[in-house]
Image: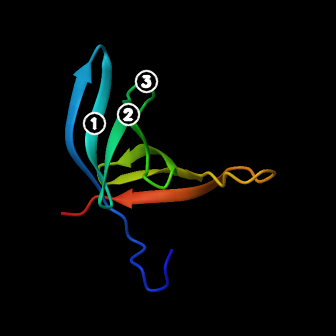
Amino acid sequence: MKKGADATLRLVITSVKQENGKWTGVGRFGATPVKIDVDTTGSKPALHWTAATGTVYNLSLLDDKNLVGTATLTTGAVGRGDRDRSVKLEKKQ
């Protein structure tokens, strides 16, 4: 991240639909459009998407206002594996 850059990224979900028994959404993560896969098989819904940087996000609904999970950063370097980082997104009004 560039020095002085805003560390706050926003997930904005613009639409959600069910097709062939699977839920998907469309939105923006930061300024980038993303396709969001919605998993409803667990006790709480989970969202999965890949950012423009290649980072894979896997977040579950914690409560009415929070999503928590991981961001998997892929290095692409030989001998260096992927790295998981904790992520929490909070709903803002």
For badge 1, the amino acid type reads Gly
Is residue 34 placed above or below 37 in the rendered structure?
below
Q: Dot 1 lies on which element?
A: strand
Is residue 26 placed above or below 93 in the rendered structure?
above
Extreme residue in the bottom direction: 4
Q: Which residue is mark 3?
A: 41
- The answer to whether marks 1 and 2 mark residues whose Cβ atoms lie closer than 8 Å is yes
Residue ID at (48%, 55%): 53
**Where residue 49 sits in the image (x, y, percent)?**
42, 42
Q: Dot 2 lies on which element?
A: strand
C-alpha gap between disc 1 and disc 2? 6 Å
Residue 37: assigned label: 2
For badge 3, the amino acid type reads Thr
90 relative position to 19: left or right: right
**Count of numbered marks:** 3
Query: In which quadrant of the rendered view does residue 26 lie?
Result: top left
Q: Which residue is mark 1?
A: 25
C-alpha gap between disc 2 and disc 3? 12 Å
